[in-house]
Image: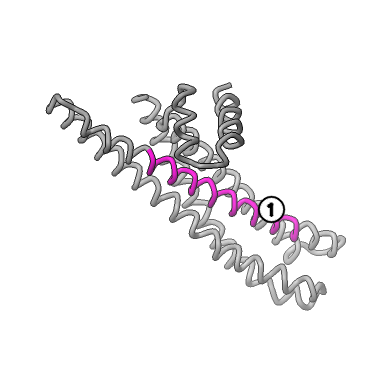
Amino acid sequence: MRRLILACCALLALLALGGCQSAYYSAMEKAGIHKRDILVDRVEDARDAQQEAKEQFKDALERYRSVVEVQGGDLEKRYNALDREYEASMASARNVRSRIEAVEDVADALFKEWEGELKQYSNASLKAASAKELSRTRAEYRTRLQRMKAAEQRIEPVLSVLRDQVLFLKHNLNARAIGALHGEYRALQSNVDQLVADMQRAIDEADIFIRRLQAEG
């Protein structure tokens, strides 16, 4: 329900304000949804996008295996299925990238606001406590963000290898050409396995960060 409300508010704000992020955050604040809430929601979205990408690349690897290692059957049909998996993998990569960018945008706005509010304190001890919490939250966020970006950066090398194989097969869909690609499957499998492991670490750390933000919210 909260996601639905958030999505509706976001749509109305963007339509009314032409997509200006600062105005969008202001409108959300007036609706009772703060930047910390939006950050939690966007980290969840980034985590989910990485989970989907992880599964998508595993599916693409299995589809590639079905082309180069499985004997018999309709080869062209299997190639077309592989091509669809490749296109879906590219879409997943774009989604992960855009979700991470959305996290960065709201996090920057949140920390800028938090820093500005420190100047409003008259109580020195409360100001120091808030400043300490800001520093801790920002440091933890940067660690999680670096993990997400590191996993995301592993996507393009995998896509590049997959792209080469799909392009080669497009014009060389015969047993001899496929035989030459048997060794490539192992290399691609290694790349995908590493990508999946990195994605899972990023997902696990995102879960930790989400729980801490929610506990403090």
Residue range in magenta is 82-109
Whether residue 82 is situated above or below residue 138 in the rendered picture: below
Residue kind at label 1, given as amino acid type: Ala
Which residue is labeled 1 in the image?
A: 88
Q: Report the magenta stretch's main SS.
A: helix
Give the colouring mode of the picture: one colour
In the picture shown, does residue 216 fall above or below 11?
above
**Quarter of the image that includes the N terminus:** top right
Q: Is residue 155 left or right of residue 71?
A: left
Q: Position of residue 51 (x, y in %)?
A: 56, 43
Judge whether residue 176 is colored magenta: no
Residue visible at 57% across and 37% down in the picture: 14
Measuring from the top left, give residue 90's x and y in whole percent: 64, 57
91 inside magenta stretch: yes
Q: Nearer the viewer, residue 146 or 176?
A: 146
Q: Quadrant of residue 87?
A: bottom right
Q: Residue at x 37, y 37 (%)?
A: 110
Counting labels gives: 1
Quadrant placement of the C terminus:
top left
Percent coordinates x, y for residue 12 in the rendering: 60, 31
For the point 62% across and 54% down, the residue is 57
Q: Between 169 and 149, which is closer to the camera in this rendering?
A: 149
Residues 181 and 144: in front is: 144
Residue most toward the left? Answer: 124
Q: Is residue 217 above or below residue 169?
A: above
Residue sitting at x 61%, y 36%: 15
Left or right? Give the position of 85 relative to 146: right
Q: Position of residue 144 (x, y in %)?
A: 38, 45
How packed mark 1 is, by other alpha carbons closer than 10 Å (few <14, some 14-19, many 20 or more), is: some
Tell me the element at label 1.
Answer: helix
